[in-house]
Image (cartoon, rainbow, N blue to C red):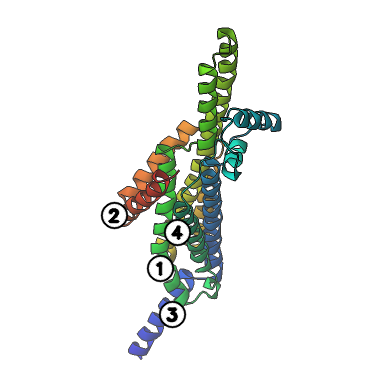
Amino acid sequence: MRFMRALLLSGLALLSFLCSGCTPEKARALQGAAVQFRAESLAAVNYIEILMKKEVAPAPRSETAASAEFADSILSLEQSRALNDEIIRLAMNPYTVAPDPQLEKQRADFLADLRLQYSTFASMFDDLERGSFLARNAVKKSEPYAGKLTSQMGAFAQSLSQNPPRLLQFRSSLIDRMEKVRKDSKLSPEEKRRLLIGLMEEWQTMEASEADLQRSAIEQCLKAASLGIEVRQLIQQYDKLSLDDLNNLSARALSAAGELSGKNLESLKSKSAEIFARIKADPDLGRLADLALAQINRIQQTGP
């Protein structure tokens, strides 16, 4: 009888532990945090894709300016030189920066793989509501993925802090126009000064656009990274946390990510260094962070 009683008590204790360790409500709370992490991360990937495209996008020109430059370019050719498709295309858009097709494919594949990884991670929690022992195992199995994806977002923020985006065609256009004004013997010194002052203002506008691109992308990557750190901790402590704990910690994580909105660039750079250092200090995440940063920098540095 004593043995049976002890066995019964042990069974009840185990059942109680399993019920407290993984319930449908707790599963939904964790799933909600994972889905939000996916949403913030995919938004960050979208920002990065936009940034990469804008780096090689044509410089902004009015139709009047584009037409005038086209005419000037054609008229400046030697009379003996015959026009062809290539000359006309170049005259229509003389500042084109043609990206390496292989690099373009590499970037596209990289971004597509990132999107798949974050979507796959969130889908790992789709069946957690069963509240079973198998679900608890699924939570544990998700931890390495959470660590890898968090490291990637932290690496993106750090890389963008160290390597600001450059609007390459915009810069090429302005430099070329400044050179033309500087060397134009038909212009008076006062005309040159007036034109160069206008080009300086365009340069400042361009730099402001670059800084805004950088700030927005870092902000979104940091939101994802900070949320990822918290989601990983929720996964690690899942069995020990109550439903209230999970809800409170999830809300705190979302609030902390939201507090990054609207911060200036210098504040975000500082926060990026802080979060990346925190990721690097984790024995399991440090190597992943270094690998992610090296891959991201390689794609950026081999750009056009």
**Whole-Å distance between the Cαs marked 2 and 3?**
38 Å
Q: Are marks 4 and 3 in contact (CB under 8 Å)?
A: no
In the rendering, which numbered label is found on residue 283? 2
Q: Residues within 10 Å of mark 2 (few under 14, many from 20)?
A: few
Q: Which label lies toward us, 1 or 2?
A: 2
Looking at the picture, which amino acid does disc 1 mark? Answer: Lys
Q: CA distance from mark 1 to mark 2?
A: 18 Å
Amino acid type of the residue tagged 3 in the rendering: Leu
Between 58 and 137, the one nearer to me in the picture:
58
Q: Which residue is rendered at x = 34% and y = 88% of the image?
A: 2
> Residue pushed farthest bottom?
1
Q: Earlier in the sequence, mark 1 or mark 2?
A: 1
Distance CA(mark 1)–CA(mark 4): 10 Å
Q: Residue at x 41, y 76 (%)?
A: 13
Circle 4 Cα neighbour tier, 10 Å, few/some/many (<14 / 14–19 / ≥20)? many
Residue type for callout 4: Leu
